[in-house]
Image (spheres, rainbow, N blue to C red):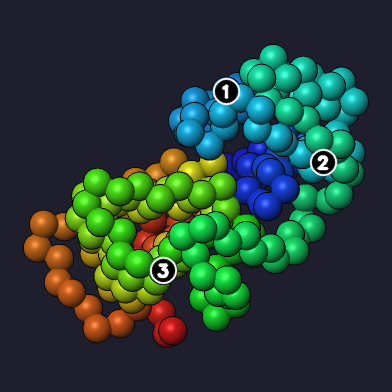
Amino acid sequence: MGQELIKIKGGADGFQLIVDSSAKLEEVQAELEKKLAENPEFFPEGTEFKLVVADLNKNVKKGISEFLTNKGLNIANSTNTAVQQKEQPKVNVNTQQNQGQQAANSGISQQEMTVVNRTVRNGEQITSNGSVMICGNVNPGASIVAAGSIDIRGTCRGIVHAGAAGDIEAFVVADCLLPTQVRIANLIARSPDNIEKNNFAEKAYIKDGQIVIEPIER
């Protein structure tokens, strides 16, 4: 898989836009256009982006800001933090979640965490700008869409989309991983018709340009 010129990562303070210093403005604009169009539910008008750049050309930086502003998106003060800098863990729990639920034991992405303490039923969709933990099952016909990673403490039989904003480092883990469809960033994998239930947890992630599923220990 080729080098990504831009990455979008969700967090409690909005989205971080990480731009490769070698990127040309036209390339960045084209990639941004594609990512925004693929997941419009994540980027409604007024969404805030924070540029995270390393020695990015001033004209490119200005062009990115103008491009996003023209899309009705807000620009936070940019920072020259190196692209390798790690985000600090943040937890944001909504009204569906119990206070104090932590993601440290799951190995899930260090991002804003949405925790749902119930089974997600047919026809329901859970969407998050960060990562998602489901303490229950994901039934057939349900879907989980997250900018970060997804951790299901139960059986997953629905549709799961991790890294929906383009994060190829995102992953999906479940106690029993039997999804109708699993997506990570722009890659899609479907379960075989006669998939067998396993007695161990599994993790789906991108390796060598494709989604692979491997057993893990909880």
Residue 106: percent from left, percent from top? 51, 76
Name, please, the residue furthest toward the left.
194
- Viewer-side label of 3, 2: 3
For the question of whether residue 31 can be seen, the reply is no
Question: Residue visible at 62% across and 60% down?
Answer: 92
**SS at mark 2 in the image:** strand
In the picture of the structure, the residue carrying the numbered disc 2 is 53
Q: Nearer the viewer, residue 80 or 111?
A: 111
In the picture of the structure, the residue carrying the numbered disc 1 is 33
Q: Is residue 81 above or below residue 214?
A: above
- Marks 3 and 2 sit apart, C-alpha to C-alpha, by 37 Å
In the picture of the structure, the residue carrying the numbered disc 3 is 117
**SS at mark 3 in the image:** loop
> Seen in the image, is 173 located left or right of residue 129?
left
Location of the C terminus by quadrant is: bottom left
**Mark earlier in primary sequence (1, 3):** 1
Question: Residue visible at 22% across and 78% down?
Answer: 198
Q: Amino acid at mark 2?
A: Val
**Label 3 crowd bin: few (<14), some (14–19), many (20+), radius 10 Å:** some
- Viewer-side label of 1, 3: 3
